[in-house]
Image (cartoon, rainbow, N blue to C red):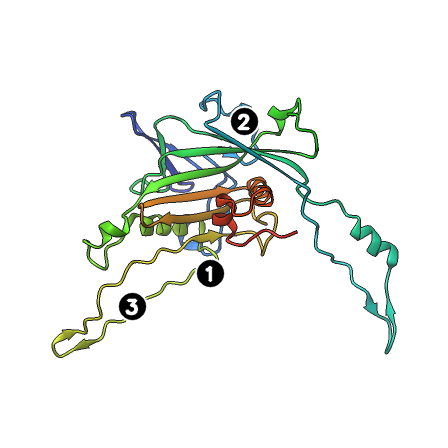
Amino acid sequence: MNTGSRALVTAVMLLGALGCAVALAGDMPPRAKRVKYHAPTGFAGYDWGAPRAGFQRLPAEPSKVTAAWMRGKQREPIYYCVPTGQFGVQCDLRALLDQMNTPREGTGFHVLSEYKVEGQGFKFQDDGVLMYPAIYQFCAQWDSTERVQPENFDQLNKFCGMRLLFDTESLAELRDRPEDYVTKYEHVLDELIAEFGKPAGFLLRGRVTIETASGPEPDGRRERRFSTWRWCPASDRGLATSCKSSIVLSVDPELGRGVVLISAPALWQYAYAREELERGDPLFAVMHARPARN
């Protein structure tokens, strides 16, 4: 493996085929310098925004298609009146009216198509946790009120994200493990930080053990806690991430099932539209963790 531009993702063919190295689009800096978030510009050799037609290995038909329509998000006003003297205020009325008439963002239809290659999984490191299945996501958006698929849909349908699933230890399984046992979820978190930098609000928390003459003070066994971590999420109720892509790591500790979402801005807009259509959309909830608002 080239040490100057190390492959970040290793494809693992679960059906007995030999694994092959697959690099994320764009070179990454060395691990030691990877402090701030470095957004992936694509996945498995494809850039975000690549048309669906360019993915030769994907099946002809998607495994899932969902859609939403929204009237768009009004941009926040940025024009303000300014004081001109001790008691005066000057406003440019024309500029203010023009700003109020600014077209909404994300107006129209949003369609998400998902595909997967049977038997294909990924690892962020050679000895890392297996991500399987790996779901390729494509977003198409157009501004219209007619429920008709546009003739140029194939050109509009572009690569916008990856949904990577993995198995980890459930809470029931952890009750029989040592308290300092490192779960697969924690391994995945370490791998993501090593490759892309720290998520928003990341803080390691320790635990203090008080020892007496007779040994550690018993305080009862505590249930493990698992956080959802987000790299470059959208601003408060924002329409999309400001980065080339965001990352979300989340886990259902009862089921022992985790997910890594890598999402370009187009996928964020789709999730926002779904939330506008039906409050409580699960994709929006895990990506944003706040209700949408016009």
Residue sticking out furthest to the left: 214
For badge 3, the amino acid type reads Arg
Q: CA distance from mark 2 to mark 1?
A: 35 Å
Q: Which amino acid, mark 2?
A: Arg
Tell whether label 3 touches label 2 (CB within 8 Å). Answer: no
Q: Position of residue 153 (x, y in %)?
A: 62, 25
Residue 52 has which mark? 2
Q: At 29% across and 25% down in the image, what residue appears?
A: 15
Mark 3 vs 1, N-terminal side: 1
Q: Residues within 10 Å of mark 1 (few under 14, many from 20)?
A: few
Residue 29 visible in image:
no
Mark closest to the chain's N terminus, 2 or 3: 2
Residue placed at 54% from the left, 41% from the top? 264
Q: Give how far across and how far down residue 122 sits, in percent.
A: 37, 36
The residues bearing labels 2 and 3 have C-alpha atoms spaced at a distance of 48 Å
Other-residue count near label 2 (Cα within 10 Å), few / some / many at <14 / 14–19 / ≥20: many
Residue that protrudes farthest toward the top in the picture: 60
Return the mark for residue 201.
1
* Residue pointed to by mark 3: 207
Residue at image coords 45%, 22%: 59
Image position of 32 (left or right of 184): right
Dot 1: element: loop
Task: Find the distance from the CA under tag 3 to the CA under tag 1.
Answer: 19 Å
Please tell me the numbered disc located at residue 15. Answer: none
Q: Nearer the viewer, residue 114 or 274?
A: 274
Residue 224 in view in this figure: yes
Depth check: give the residue in front, 4 or 90. 90
Above or below, 244 relative to 210? above
Q: Is label 2 in a helix, a strand or a loop?
A: helix
Element carrying mark 3: loop
